[in-house]
């Protein structure tokens, strides 16, 4: 069954990345299964055909004999789908993931101090169909990354007999000379998820220094205030993000769902929804 599992490995959301001084490391692994896709699609098609057949019988468009013959023909085409199951041995599925580093044309266990950061689903056992996946993240703090020997590493993951793609990871003792906006957003979100709000605030302030009124700047400030439980400030930041988006994208009819959902959630937390509704009722009267 493990041969049906596809593993996709990334480092800090990329397939190759250089870790500079002060950077965290996030190894993310996705386990999926596409081998049974055709079988599952066939079975779904047969289910649809059987439903239509039942409707035809109820409407008396076909006889009982025709119904039975056609039902038998459709059922005979059904295939048994044996999707691989991970974590079936009683231990959480993510504990079976192993990381390896290439050395001297061979693979050795990776000895980095990785800690489970996030996993989905939460169940110990996961049955991988063509529409289900399993996802896990393993992290290293900036301090742990700074302690790594400088160099370039080839890393892969395994889950049973399944192997992931190989990623290239560079480790540098220097600070990143030109961090991109995407990288700063990633680092800030990682730090907030890890509870390092002060460090995250520093990164966000650096991010917004050049573009203080951009959509992304307001989103990140909103996420920071939300993580710090300063919900009124967070709500104001997301409202500014919505205005910035409309200003930057005048031809876009629909605003981002994420911004609108955060505004709605924060409005509930701050009571702004009730306040707005009362204002509307007063205006109507």
Image (cartoon, grey):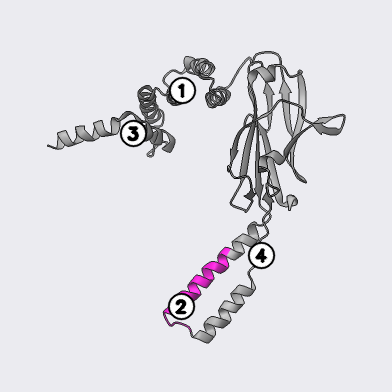
Residue ID for mark 2:
56
Magenta-span inclusion, residue 18 = no
Q: Relative to 74, is 223 on the left or the right? A: left
- Rendered residue at 47%/18% (across/down): 208
Residue ID for mark 4:
80
Query: Relative to the observer, which residue lies in front, 25 or 214?
Result: 25
Q: Earlier in the sequence, mark 3 or mark 1?
A: 1
Return the x and y of residue 195 as percentages of the image width and height.
Answer: 53, 23
Q: Are circles 2 and 3 on residues that touch, CB within 8 Å? A: no
Q: Earlier in the sequence, mark 2 or mark 1?
A: 2
Residue ID for mark 1:
224
Query: Relative to the observer, which residue lies in front, 127 or 235?
Result: 127
Q: Are circles 2 and 1 on residues that touch, CB within 8 Å? A: no
Query: Relative to the observer, which residue lies in front, 218 or 190?
Result: 190
Residue range in magenta is 44-62
Q: Is residue 117 above or below residue 35?
A: above
Disc 2 versus disc 1: distance between alpha carbons?
A: 58 Å
Residue ID for mark 3:
268
Q: Is residue 20 visible?
A: no
Q: Secondary structure at mark 1?
A: helix
Disc 3 versus disc 1: distance between alpha carbons?
A: 18 Å
Query: Relative to the observer, which residue lies in front, 118 or 23?
Result: 118
Q: Seen from this angle, which residue lies furthest front?
A: 90
- Rendered residue at 46%/78% (across/down): 56
When asked about the image quadrant of residue 170, the answer is top right
Q: Secondary structure at mark 2?
A: helix
């Amino acid at each position: 069954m493990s041969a049906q599992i596809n593993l996709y490995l990334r480092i800090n959301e990329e397939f190759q990345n250089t870790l500079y001084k002060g950077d965290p490391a996030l190894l993310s692994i996705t386990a999926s299964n596409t081998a049974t896709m055709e079988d599952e699609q066939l079975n779904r098609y047969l289910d649809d055909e059987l439903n239509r057949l039942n409707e035809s019988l109820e409407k008396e468009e076909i006889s009982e004999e025709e119904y039975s013959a056609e039902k038998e023909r459709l059922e005979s085409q059904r295939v048994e789908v044996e999707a691989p199951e991970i974590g079936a041995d009683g231990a959480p599925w993510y504990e079976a993931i192993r990381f390896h580093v290439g050395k001297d044309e061979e693979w050795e266990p990776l000895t980095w101090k990785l800690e489970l950061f996030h996993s989905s689903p939460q169940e110990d056992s996961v049955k991988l169909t063509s529409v289900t996946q399993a996802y896990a993240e393993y992290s290293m703090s900036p301090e742990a990354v700074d302690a790594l020997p400088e160099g370039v590493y080839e890393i892969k993951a395994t889950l049973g007999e399944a192997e992931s793609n190989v990623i290239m990871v560079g480790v540098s003792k220097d600070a990143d000379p030109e961090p991109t906006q995407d990288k700063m957003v990633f680092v800030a979100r990682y730090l907030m998820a890890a509870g390092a709000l002060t460090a995250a605030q520093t990164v966000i302030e650096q991010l917004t220094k050049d573009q203080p009124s951009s959509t992304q700047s307001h989103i990140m400030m909103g996420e920071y205030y939300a993580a710090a439980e300063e919900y009124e400030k967070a709500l104001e930041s997301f409202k500014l993000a919505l205005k910035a988006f409309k200003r930057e994208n005048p031809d876009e009819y629909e605003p981002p769902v994420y911004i609108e959902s955060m505004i709605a959630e924060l409005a509930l937390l701050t009571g702004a929804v009730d306040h707005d509704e009362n204002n509307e009722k007063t205006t109507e009267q």
